[in-house]
Amino acid sequence: MEDRLESLETKMMSAEDQLDELNRTVWRQQQELDLLREHVRQLAQQLKTIQPGAPGRPEDEIPPHW
């Protein structure tokens, strides 16, 4: 009986460690998602400020015969 109890306690400690590690991973991923969302928001804002129809670089223009 004592061995079974020790085995269960060991498994429970391992599960708690794994849960803590998963929580840390989720927290880091949330931080990265927040940062990426902010970057996307900034890029969207930059796109809104670009003048439509503004002359681009000549090398980006498609020649008329294409």
Image (spheres, rainbow, N blue to C red):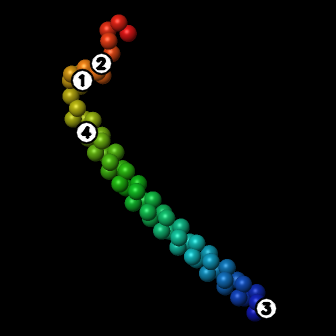
| Mark in front: 3 vs 4 | 4
Identify the residue at image location x=36%, y=50%. Answer: 37
Assign the C terminus to one quadrant of the image: top left
Q: Residues within 10 Å of mark 4 (few under 14, many from 20)?
A: few
Q: Amino acid at mark 2?
A: Glu
How far apart marks 1 and 3 lie (CA) works out to: 79 Å
The answer to whether marks 1 and 3 mark residues whose Cβ atoms lie closer than 8 Å is no
The answer to whether marks 3 and 4 mark residues whose Cβ atoms lie closer than 8 Å is no
Residue tagged 3 = 1
Residue tagged 4 = 46
Compare marks 3 and 4 and give the one earlier in the sequence: 3
Give the secondary structure at mark 2: loop
Q: Residues within 10 Å of mark 1 (few under 14, many from 20)?
A: few
Give the secondary structure at mark 1: loop
How far apart marks 1 and 2 lie (CA) works out to: 7 Å
Give the secondary structure at mark 4: helix
| Mark in front: 4 vs 1 | 1
Residue tagged 1 = 56
Give the secondary structure at mark 3: loop
Which numbered marker is on residue 7?
none
Compare marks 2 and 4 and give the one earlier in the sequence: 4
How far apart marks 4 and 1 lie (CA) works out to: 16 Å
Identify the residue at image location x=56%, y=72%. Answer: 19
Relative image position of residue 48 (x, y in whole percent): 25, 35
Q: Is residue 40 above or below residue 25?
A: above
The answer to whether marks 1 and 2 mark residues whose Cβ atoms lie closer than 8 Å is yes
Q: Residue furthest top?
A: 65
Relative image position of residue 18 (x, y in whole percent): 58, 72
Residue tagged 2 = 61
Compare marks 2 and 3 and give the one earlier in the sequence: 3
